[in-house]
Amino acid sequence: MESSVQEARQSIREEVRRLCQDFPDTYWQDVDKHEKYPQEFVDALTTSGYLAALIPEEYGGAGLGITEASIILEEINRSGGNGAVCHAQMYTMGTLLRHGSDEQKRRYLPAIAQGKLRLQAFAVTEPNAGSETTRIETRAVLKGDRYFVTGQKIFISRAHYSDLMLLLARTTPYEELKDKTQGLSVFLVDMREVKKGLEIQPLDIMVNHHTTTCFFEDMEVPVENRLGDEGKGFRYIIDGWNAERILVASESIGDGRWFVDRASKYATNRVVFGRPIGANQGIQFPISKAYAHVEAADLMRFTAASKFDRGEKCGAEANMAKLLASEAAWEAADVCMSTYGGYGFARDYDVERKFRETRLLVAAPVSNNMVLAFLGQNVLGMPKSY
Ligand SMILES: Cc1cc2nc3c(=O)[nH]c(=O)nc-3n(C[C@H](O)[C@H](O)[C@H](O)COP(=O)(O)OP(=O)(O)OC[C@H]3O[C@@H](n4cnc5c(N)ncnc54)[C@H](O)[C@@H]3O)c2cc1C
């Protein structure tokens, strides 16, 4: 690879690292303890331009690739922070870029790039559908020039901290479809303009993720807020999955490196029975092994990201990166917890917070079972379980 590209990426890494230094452990501890939204951090990331990494330059963004976006999220998590507080803007950007009209892009992208408009909510999951997205029931019925949306979404993160919501809803009843992947449509709902029919309730979960349940009752959405063609929404959402998996992998890698750093330092400094605990192979080897697994996952992340940025098929690599990185981070988290002994449970040390946060990445935004099913069925050609 050209050395100028490498240097540019290294300088992004260093700049994000510097930005994150203004948000030390105590900042994230406070946010977690009081279940606050880290607005100051998100503002800093917006002002620096990094949150608009994937928005093309013509719309005021940085016009960077998924490789650079993944480095940004990795560095946030590696610093002890949590990229999940704003990563949805990066995940969802592709749907708007690929399937939005010129008019929609002109209307939304410059304002998002400037931080005047927040695109942080992505509403797919439903209580009765779960991983089977083609079974979602939230209906959008077209009457005149408006859709009327009725239904319920669950686990919708940051809906209280977003102006726009990318919403997947059913426009054709399931029973009327020959092809079950059709009949769903994507809407960019401007929640500031919703007068009635939308209720958002916080969901109490084990991580500070600002997750909600959203209830829709005849919520009006103008037809011009539909992205792309009616009925093709599932395909549009799937188009974004590779980017999402690569970005989640990068957060896991950041977490994994954070755990390995903390564990190896603690093991070197903590003296029990007259020697550093890290001199004991029962402590040292698991840290070394977790380190090796994180670094191996990182190679798959960059393979997937490079292919993505070259416009090549990367489903296998993106899924493997997500699987390997989230498992490596979770292994590193567990090892770090063991290394810290009782102190791992003390909130001041941050290990338990990161432990909770990194565990989420095994299960969401896609569970590793679904990743394994993709590899088994779509890559290796084995029989389908669904
Ligand atoms: C903190 C958090 C934030 C989230 N944020 C969002 C968000 O912003 N927007 C959004 O739309 N969703 C969000 N989600 C939802 C998340 O994407 C879903 O939880 C996930 O897709 C799985 O759906 P489910 O929980 O209903 O699990 P289910 O579908 O009920 O599955 C339960 C378990 O069974 C496994 N399973 C199911 N079928 C099979 C099979 N055929 N083979 C093997 N295993 C199977 C699953 O992999 C999973 O492990 C969030 C979830 C969490 C926890």
Image (spheres, grey):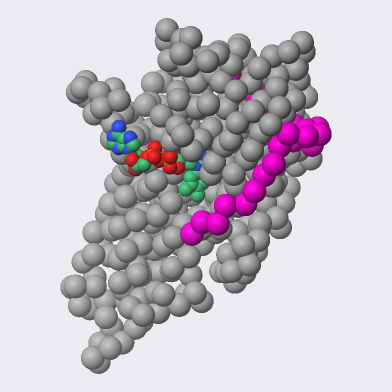
Residue at 57%, 52% in the rendered image: 203
Q: Quadrant of the C terminus?
A: top left
Give x and y (percent) for residue 262.
40, 69
Number of residue marks: 0
Relative height, residue 282 to residue 36 (above, below): below
Residue at 52%, 15% in the rendered image: 173
Q: Is residue 73 or residue 366 the one in the foreground?
A: 366
Answer left or right for 111 relative to 383: right
Q: Residue furthest bottom?
A: 274
Is residue 109 among the parts visible in the rendering? no
Range shown magenta: 185-206
Q: Quadrant of the N terminus?
A: top left
Relative height, residue 319 to residue 357 (above, below): above
Give x and y (percent) for residue 152.
58, 35
The answer to which image quadrant residue 384 occupies is: top left
Q: Is residue 156 or residue 213 the one in the foreground?
A: 213
